[in-house]
Amino acid sequence: MAGPDATQVMTDLMYTPEWQAANPGPYTVLGDPTMTPRARRQHLRASDSHDAWDHLPEITAPTFILHGSDDRFAPVVNAEILASAIPDARTHVFDGARHAYFDECRAEASPLVMNFLDDSAS
């Protein structure tokens, strides 16, 4: 699938209908429009073959996992699984948000991230 239909499918995975209605696109989260089809395929291939699962317990940096409760691209249970594999990871789930919680919940997400960074720096 390509073209406007594919764009709408991806948009629906990223954002709730309510957020889309209040914030008409285009949305930069859907990728770099200057990227060639070949570059997009290479990016997807690299993403698909990337697997760092066995190395997650080695992470020593402070880790904050953020996720939308209504994420249809990566189910919210993934945040819990990821947090269980990373020592001392913190998790926050944005109620009602989808994959692009950082846009949908910007007013809530930004202070949480800033506080996490402040706490991690001390």
Image (tube, rainbow, N blue to C red):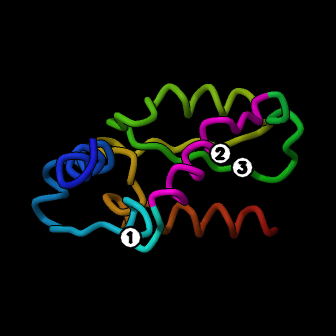
Front in this rendered view, residue 85 or 74: 74
Residue at 37% from the left image edge and 68% from the top image edge = 28
Residue 113 position (above or below residue 3): below
Q: Residues within 10 Å of mark 2 (few under 14, many from 20)?
A: few
Q: In which quarter of the image is residue 70?
A: top left
Nearer-N-terminus badge (2/1):
1
Q: Position of residue 111 (x, y in %)?
A: 50, 68
Q: Is mark 1 on a helix, strand or loop?
A: loop
The single residue placed furthest to the front in the displayed view is 38
Quadrant placement of the N terminus: top left
Q: Which residues, given as a range, are shown in magenta?
A: 37-53
Q: Which labelled disc corresponds to residue 33?
A: 1
The type of residue carrying mark 2 is Ala
Q: What element carries label 2?
A: helix
Q: Which residue position is annotated with label 2? A: 46
Could you tell me how far apart the alpha carbons at marks 3 and 2 are, in whole angstroms? 23 Å
Residue 11 position (above or below residue 1): below
Q: Which labelled disc corresponds to residue 63?
A: 3
Q: Which labelled disc corresponds to residue 113?
A: none
With 56 as the anchor, is 27 left or right in this view? left
